[in-house]
Amino acid sequence: MSDLRDLYQEVILDHSKRPRNHRRPEQFDASAEGHNPLCGDRLTVFLKVADGVLTEVAFEGQGCAISTASASMMTEALRGRTVDEARALFERFHRSVTEASASDEELGKLAAFEGVREFPVRVKCATLAWHTLRAAIEASAKTVSTE
Amino acid sequence: MRQPPTESSPAPVGPARPTPLDPTALRREFPILEHPVHGRRLAYLDNAATTQKPREVLAALEHHYSTQCSNVHRGVHYLSQKATDAFEAARVTIARFVGAADPREIVFVRGTTEAINLVAGTFGRSRIGEGDEVLITGLEHHSNIVPWQMLVQERRARLVVAPVRDDGSVALADVAERIGPRTRLVAVTHISNALGTVLPIRDIVEAAHGRGVAVLVDGAQAVGHQRVDVRALGCDFYCFSGHKMYGPTGIGVLYGRLDRLEDMPPWQGGGDMIESVSFERSTWNRVPHKFEAGTPDIAGAIGLAAAAGFLRGLDPERVAAHERGILSAATAALEEIPGIRILGQAPEKSGVVSFLLDGVHPHDIGTVLDLEGVAIRAGHHCAQPVMQRFGVPATARASFGVYNGTDDIDALVGGLRRVRELFC
């Protein structure tokens, strides 16, 4: 039997109640909208990118505790990382919530979401922000390449 | 505050009240409810999505496959005759169960969705042209929106929607005033799956028929929960699903008044729906076989008849009274929890309660309740326009059946207190 606290860990509850970087920046280089048709949740991720480094990551939108906390913790984890590091972290995070494997030390606080893998219908909640991030990164890459 | 009926309640005025159902005894008729979920006694409160199956339905399926499995309307051999007899007897049982005048008015389909698509594809495509209108309400399930949307797009016709009032009801006047010279069909739900609102079907039919307009009723949420008499309602079409009335999945019914069905072109082509076939021309079988191409869900129809027998044995009036009692008890209990808002408080409601809890997403409510052994639905309930009407992305929904008792409501309330501890 999965315990409630395996899913809703303290850090997740904290970020869901007080999401960080939960705003629409006045200026941003790229954004993307994510949608979870299962629950109707929508969120938008905003990026500021300078020389391949994410100088600001923010998000807007309302969702369940898992998706809000995931978006909030993602924005904190990515700030100051390169675009390539962000892509790699997406892969690590995705693996950690979908595959039963040993804890990934590199994930740091994001490892709190490992409990989600016991709740297959909630995996989309945890990954919505990350999929949206990836779309925003692709959008920023396109903008850069067309300039 | 409303209370469920108890032995100490004052006797009601009016006709004798039927003996109440005993949910504890009924629960034992449903083998699945014996299995704990996450180590807890299961409080199954997702009956609007599907109902569980009693032993007699399971036994009917096993009996069919063990003793009379064969194809129908084809063979000359013993088993084929037995299967055909059982399948056609199921049609008679269902006809009686919903008050149809003639078993030929019962068309077996996969479920409500298929029944509506059948009417859209036959009655709709032969009767609806450019500039015509199909009138629905704002409470419809996607299955009573999308088939009409597809039809009106193809025909350059128009979908007209009667609005939902703030309490979740649909007023007769709001429907009636939208029935105009171009209205060809009124397609309405009997009971809203998202809010539990009961619509005034008989009055809507009267208003529509007064202007010569046919009426289709989506009865998916009604048939297992109250007495349904298609002749008393007067509708032209009535659609329902077996699995929401304690029967198997994959079987459902389109009731169509005989003259309507006779007038309609066939739907799917194939075996059984023809009278004769040559490469030049085919002619159609009689109603209802004209609409039943291919091997039907024979076991499903037999299981559905068993479910109808189960409900008849309980008496639909008692079922409705029981679920009204559970609904009032659940509503009263939820209203005592701080931060709960119930969506849909129409005067006429069936056993569905849709609710929100301040600051907590319905999916989180659903997950926490699940771990407490309480099964509810969280989401848009395939009725996104209802969610948009009330400005919410989703709700949590508890929906009741014959085996639900006050212990299930206690489990729901206990689970919601747990949700509040965690998130509020």
Image (cartoon, coloured by chain):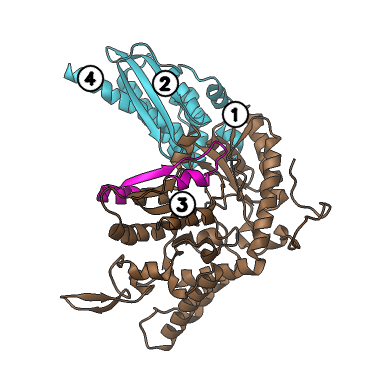
Chain colours: A cyan, B brown
Disc 3 vs disc 4: Cβ atoms closer than 8 Å? no
Residue identifier under label 1: B358
Q: Amino acid at mark 1?
A: Asp
Query: What is the CA distance from the residue labelled 3 to the residue labelled 4?
Result: 49 Å
Q: Amino acid at mark 4?
A: Thr
Mark nearer the viewer, 2 or 3? 3
Residue identifier under label 3: B188
Return the disc, 1 or 3, that comes first in the chain's sequence.
3
| Element type where label 2 sits in the image | strand
Q: Nearer the viewer, residue B308 or B372?
A: B308
State the residue at coordinates (41%, 83%): B80
Mark nearer the viewer, 3 or 4? 3
Q: Quadrant of the C terminus of chain B?
A: top right
Magenta highlight on residue B154 = yes
Q: Position of residue B275 (x, y in %)?
A: 28, 79
Q: Amino acid at mark 3?
A: Val
Residue identifier under label 4: A143
Disc 4 vs disc 2: Cβ atoms closer than 8 Å? no
Q: Nearer the viewer, residue B184 or A11?
A: B184
Query: What is the CA distance from the residue labelled 1 to the residue labelled 2?
Result: 22 Å
Q: Which residues are magenta?
A: B149-177
Q: Nearer the viewer, residue A137 or A52?
A: A137
- Marked residue chain, label 2: A
Q: Position of residue B47 (x, y in %)?
A: 57, 53
Circle number at residue A59: 2
- Marked residue chain, label 3: B
Query: What is the CA distance from the residue labelled 1 to the residue labelled 4?
Result: 40 Å
| Element type where label 4 sits in the image | helix
